[in-house]
Amino acid sequence: MINKIIAVDFDGTIVDDKYPEIGKPKIFAFETLRQSHSDGYRLTLWTYRSGKTLDEAVEFCKENGIIFYAINNSYEGEEFDHSKQSRKINADIFVDDRNLGGFPGWSAVYQIIKNRIELNIHDNGQEAPKKKKRGFFGL
């Protein structure tokens, strides 16, 4: 089992950005999240939303088959204390529409995650040696 954490933004990433409303789901968003969970990843919702709009987003995801490991925290039940902690949460991968270069789409996100697993992580969790990149003709 992988037990890596993927932190996922909501507006503009899981759904089209219509904040404070909930936008239309992005193509393959929920399928990719469900598959990533099945692959052994823990999913954390990491969003600007709070209060009622956060509750609505969490419920929308639940209705679409996604229950998060944690919400705007590093782990379930974390008590955030701004005087002792950074606002940044603990995750191995961050998926957000505001990444450098923009959001590539969920098909690309899954391929990036999947290739990272296959190329960089052994079954025992140790980092594998990097494979040499091959040229256009596989040389």
Image (cartoon, helix red, strand yellow):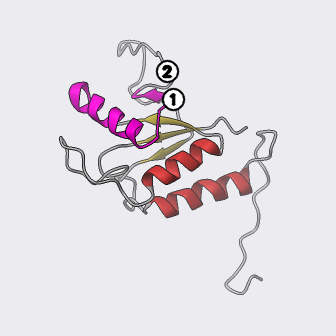
| 52 left or right of 76 in image | left
Residue flagged by tag 2: what amino acid is it? Glu
The residue positioned 27% from the left and 33% from the top of the image is 56
* Residue 131 occupies quadrant: bottom right
The residue positioned 28% from the left and 31% from the top of the image is 54
Quarter containing the N terminus: top right
The residue positioned 66% from the left and 35% from the top of the image is 3
Mark 2 Cα within 10 Å, few/some/many (few <14, many 20+)?
few
Image coords of residue 79 (percent x, y): 42, 13
State the residue lying farthest toward the front: 63
| 107 left or right of 56 in image | right
Residue 101 vertical position relative to residue 41 in the rendered view, above or below: below
Mark 1 Cα within 10 Å, few/some/many (few <14, many 20+)?
some
Tell which circle, 2 or 1, labels the residue nearer the N-terminal end: 1
Cβ–Cβ under 8 Å for marks 2 and 1: yes
Residue 106 vertical position relative to residue 73 in the rendered view, above or below: below
Q: On residue 76, which mark appears?
A: 2
Task: Confirm whether the magenta stretch covers residue 57.
Answer: yes
| 35 left or right of 83 in image | right
Give the labeled residue for mark 1.
Answer: 69
Residue 137 vertical position relative to residue 43 in the rendered view, above or below: below
Task: Confirm whether the magenta stretch covers residue 71.
Answer: yes
SS of the residue under disc 1: loop
State the residue lying farthest toward the bottom: 137
The residues colored magenta run: 50-72
